[in-house]
Amino acid sequence: MSLDLSRRRFLESSAAAAAMSALPLGAVHAQGAKYVRYNATSREGEAMLASYDRAIQKLLSLPVSDPRNWFRNAFIHTLDCPHGNWWFFVWHRPYIGYFEQTVREFSGNPNFAFPYWDWTQLPAIPGTMFKGALTPTSPYFNPYISSFETFRKFIGTSLDQYWKDPLQAQQLQIRQMPTQDALWKQVTGNPMFAVTSKARWITASSPGLDPKVAKMCDAQTIRDGLAPTTFIPFNSQITPSHTTPPGQGQLFGTLEGLPHNNVHNNVGGAINSNPSSEFGYMQDNLSPVDPLFMLHHSNMDRLLQIWNDKQTALKLPYVPEDKAQYEHWANDVFLFYINSQGQRVTQVKAGSYIDVGQFNYAYSPGSAQQLVGAAKQKALNAKFAGSKGSVAVTGALADALASASTRTVVAQVTVPHPGASGARNYDVTVNAPPGAKITADSPYYVATIAFFGNMPGMAGVETTFTVPITELRSKLKGKHANALNFQVTPQGNLPLALGKGAPLLKSVAVEVY
């Protein structure tokens, strides 16, 4: 559905309820879609991966002057991608969609669509993704990433065009990349580059996700992430634009901050205490160099569509409800996409991608699909502030944590951003005694929050993660503590950018949906 049509329908509504019902319906596209995104482990998904493999080989060998070149496409994500704000989902949908069309053309498969990696169902990298050109550690990638010098020489001056376009250059200025040299400082400073042998940290001999990361992908976490019935807090923080620089804080919605960020860091090795030279591509903004990126984000887009369809079934909007906020969100511009002919995309407004539109795909059933059309409980929207990391368990919060409750309970955990050199992943615990060993099965373990998408100037910026604590009801076994005492602890032995002993937990509040 076009932005103009969506906007007109919104503006024609005189009452809020009417405006909500007039917004585009997410389930409409699924009937009669031309392309199907299958589970990567299905027979159909395996066939799509074979087509993907063929296309990658061709895209790697394209001249770097062609913007469809594999690495040129990956740099779009580095130059422009929003994280930790309310354009996260709507930006990635066309990024994946346009590249899917390119892969379709180069694969020779007219029905190609990206499979999705359902990490809730399979908390391990699908085995096929370690074969052929489907892994960046393969010989197909080596001519380009055998060393940093080789990589930068290969890319050469092909990226200069972005600074020759006034509108693109303006956005790059905001993103603190006023020159190509500034871009490379981000690439090496975060760091984003990896040599072929280190391009993916998880290996074929040990393909499983870390137990804590798997926990952040499990059915309960996804169910809680899909529970909100309004655009915010399902999406991440409202910001002036998708290119807004750090300084105003960040807020990660549950699905972005937990499964999305954790999987990126785990595949790239950033959850561990490895030196930066051993980080793979998936842990930062050059992550699309790894072919797994497209399967990971296809699954994130699948969850977005499940939420959209759930909202539709409940006759609720899946765009910002406030008219002014909707206009602001829908009119933001995305200027870096490339179509399958290697041309700049002219459809640039965020609102153009509310639904799948011209991409014309649907998803085969996967985990969490059953939540579409689930009965809606009247939202409680109760919030309970904490003091020094402690939240009293009384009244509505005690009721919500009761074993019979069907409410979703989340904690808004605020911590300072560690910057590029600090630990990426932090364990959140509740009522843990001093010295307790925290594993994924620990009764005190709640979540692992993960930073992803670092930009210069982020160090110290207060960042809030939406952490489901619904499962505390089973851990408390019906015996509520008088208070929930939260702690945040860095994983591994990477340094804290803010200095040893710096307080990690700035504030916490608990909210009940």
Image: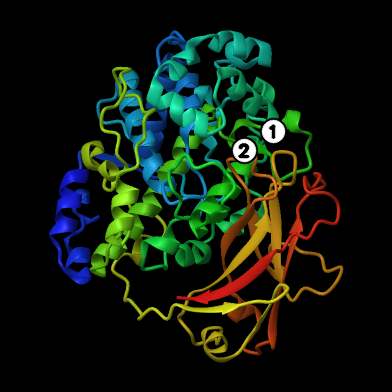
- Residue in front for this viewpoint, 49 or 68: 68
> What element does badge 2 sit on?
helix
Can you give x and y, in whole percent of width and height, for residue 399 in the image? 53, 89
Q: What's the amino acid at mark 1? A: Phe
Q: Is residue 424 above or below residue 319?
A: above
Left or right of 381: which side holds 415?
right
Q: What label does residue 283 carry, if any?
A: 2
> What element does badge 1 sit on?
loop
- Identify the image quadrant of the C terminus: bottom left
- Residue in front for this viewpoint, 241 or 445: 241
Can you give x and y, in whole percent of width and height, for residue 329 in the image? 34, 49
Residue 111: image quadrant is top left
Left or right of 121: which side holds 109?
left
Q: Are marks 2 and 1 in contact (CB under 8 Å)?
A: yes
Can you give x and y, in whole percent of width and height, for residue 368 in the image? 40, 61
Q: What's the amino acid at mark 2? A: Gln
Crowd class of label 1 (few under 14; some 14 to 19; many from 20; radius 10 Å) = many
Can you give x and y, in whole percent of width and height, for residue 150 in the image? 64, 10
**Which residue position holds label 1?**
279
- Residue in front for this viewpoint, 157 or 102: 157
Q: Residue furthest left?
A: 12
Q: Is residue 429 visible?
A: yes
Q: Is residue 283 above or below residue 328?
A: above
Q: Residue at position x 83%, y 69% from top?
A: 436
